[in-house]
Amino acid sequence: MNRPAAMDTVSPAVDPITAEIIMHGLSAIPNLVDKNVTRTAYSFLISEYKDYAVGIVDADGRLISQCKGGLPIFCANALCAAVKDGLRIYGKDRLQQDDVVISNCAATMGQHLNNVVMYTPVRTSAADAGLLGFMVIVMHWLDVGGITVGSCQSPYTTDVFQEGIQFPTVKLLAGGRRVEEIYRIIESNTRFPKLVLGDLESQLAGCLAGRDMILELARRYGSSEMRAAVEMFWSKSERAMRDCIRRIPDGVYRAASFLDDDGITRDQPVPIDIAVKIAGDEITIDYSGIADQLRGPLNAGYEGGAVAAARIACKYLFAPHEPANDGAYRPINIVCPPGKFLSAGPTAPIGGSGFSIPTVVDTILRALAPALPERVPAAHHGTYSVHVITGRMPGDGSWFQHLESTIGGWGAARDRDGPGPFRSNAHGDTKEVPVELQEASHPYIVECVRLRQDSGGAGRFRGGLGVEKRYRVLAPCHLVVSIERTKCRPWGLDGGREGAAGRVEIVRGDADPIVLTKGEVDLKPDDCVRVLTAGGGGYGPPQERDRQRVLGDLRDGYVSRQAAQDEYGVGLEE
C-alpha cells in the first residue's frame, strides 16, 4: 500500500469533534475485522464459539481499542504483552512494513499455548516516528501439539513442554514474504493441520486488512491528529475509572476463596487470599496471600494471570460501559511476588491457566462487596467447566475434537435474580456451537440442553441457573473433564445461599454413573455423558423472598417442590 508522505507533518492538536470521529473509526476497525474472522475461519472454535479477540495497540504496546466480542481474558492484556515482547526483541526499527509476528511463549503471555497472538506494524514510514502502532489478533489455535489432543486440556501436565510448541516471538512474514520454515513447523506440530492453517490464514488476513484500514484513517486525518485523539480518549477513560474508585472509602478490603486442587496433588485446596487497597483514586490488588506455583496446570504467568484477573475485575466493576483501553487500566496497581500460581515461572504447566481466573475475579469483587453492595453480586458459577470429546471419525479415521466451556448461573444482586446461564466472566460473549453443527461433525447426539432445576442459590433474590447437557456417544472416543469450584461453591451474599456445584456423569447401561470433576475416561458407543453446570449464589435471606416469586419459580420449573418447601417454606397449596 502506498503510504502518504505528509502524514507526520500535521499539527498534534485535534479538535474534540475530529477526535470523536477518529476514535469511532479506530473502534470500528476491530469490529469489522472481527466479522471477517468469523466468516473466514475454518474451525468451529473460531467461527462459532469465537475464541479470539481483535485489537489495535500503539507503538509502545498500549491498548487503543478492541472488538466488542473479544474474550475479556484476552483483551485485558494478551494483545499488549505480545507486542511489548516484540518491541523488546526487535525494537521499532526491525518491525517494518509487511512484517507479521506470532507469539504464544509462556514466559511472555502467561496463558495456555493454544492462545497465539499475531500482529503486524502499522507504518507511515520506515523511521521509528512513522510507527503508528500494531494491528493485533489473538486466536485459540485448535491444537499445538502436546500430550493430549487439543494441547491445553490435560489436567495432569507438570511442565509447559508437555502442553505443546512455543513460538517465542518469531516472524511469520518478513517484508511480506512467508517464512516457510515457520509454516512447516506449525503444520508438523498440530493434529489438525487443515483447520489450524485455515484459522491462521483468517487471522493473517484480519491483521493485514485492519492495518490497511488504520492507514486509510491516518491518510484522511493525519497521524498526529490520530495520536492526539488516542491520548484524549485514554484520558477520558482514565478519569471515568478514577472517578468510580474515588467514591469508595479508603482502606484495605479482603476476601478469600479456593480452588479444589491443581489436578496433581489431589484434594489439596489452592488458597486465593486477596487484599484490595483503595487510596484516593487508585486501586491496588495484592495477591501476596495466594498459593505458590502449583505442580499441576492451573498456573498462569504474571501477565496472563495476575494482571489479566485484576483488569477484568476492575473494568467489570468500575467502568463496564467505558471502552477498554490503556487509560482505563492506569489507576490499577498489582502486587504479585514471583513464584505465585498467578505469576508462575516460564516452565510451569499452564494448560489450565484460564480455569482459575473467574474465581480470582469473583474473589476480588467479593472483597469490595461491603463497600459497594449496590454493585457487587453474589458469585457466579466461576469455572470454565471444560469438557473435551476427542477421537477418530468412523470411516476415514480423521481426528475430531469437541471442546466446550459450559454456561452456568451468575450471582444474584441486591435488587434482582441472577442472570444466565452465561459463560464465565473471563469469556464474555463467546457463543454456543449450534447442536446441528456439533452432530454433523462429531460421532454423538445431543439429547438435551435444559436448565438445571434447583442449581441457583436460594435468597431474597435467587441465583441464576446452570444447565444440563446430555451427549449420547455413537463411536469410541475419549473424554477429558476439568471442572473447578466444586468445594468452594458459588457463594451467596448478605445471607444468600450457595449455588450448586458442577460435575460430569458418565452413564453406562444400568451401572452407577461415573462422576468426574477432573479426569479422563474412554467412552464406548451408547455411553451417555451428562454435563451438569453450576448455578450462581443467592442474595439476601431466602425467607425474605417474595412468595409470588417462589410460586413463579415453581411453575416455571426453576425450583422443585421440595426446594421451595425446604429453602423458602412455600408449597403449591394455593
Image: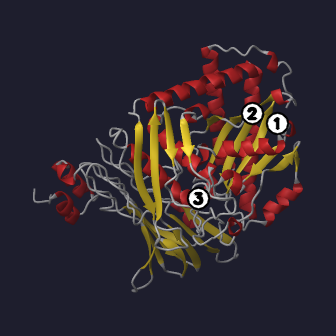
Task: Tell me if residue 345 comes above or below residue 283 in the rendering.
Answer: below
Q: The residue tagged with tag 1: helix, strand or loop?
A: helix
- Nearest the viewer among 521 and 156 is 156
Image point (48%, 30%), residue name: 281
- Determine which residue is flagged by label 2: 59
Image quarter where the N terminus lies is: top right
Task: Tell me if residue 361 comes above or below residue 554 in the rendering.
Answer: above
Q: Earlier in the sequence, mark 3 or mark 1?
A: 1
Measure the alpha-carbon separation of dots 3 and 1. 31 Å
Q: Position of residue 173 (x, y in %)?
A: 85, 47
Image point (33%, 42%), residue name: 370
Tag 1 and tag 2, C-beta contact below 8 Å: yes
Q: Is 97 displayed left or right of 276 in the figure?
A: right
Measure the alpha-carbon separation of dots 1 and 2. 8 Å
Amino acid found under the numbered disc labelled 3: Ser
Amino acid found under the numbered disc labelled 1: Lys
Q: Going by the picture, which residue comes out furthest to the left?
A: 574
Tag 3 and tag 1, C-beta contact below 8 Å: no
- Determine which residue is flagged by label 3: 353
Q: Position of residue 291 (x, y in %)?
A: 52, 60
Q: The residue tagged with tag 2: helix, strand or loop?
A: loop
Measure the alpha-carbon separation of dots 3 and 2. 28 Å
Q: Position of residue 482 (x, y in %)?
A: 52, 67
- Determine which residue is flagged by label 1: 92
Q: Is residue 432 at least partly visible in the picture?
A: no
Q: Residues within 10 Å of mark 3 (few under 14, many from 20)?
A: many
Q: Earlier in the sequence, mark 1 or mark 2?
A: 2
- How many marks are shown on the rendered structure? 3
Amino acid found under the numbered disc labelled 2: Ala
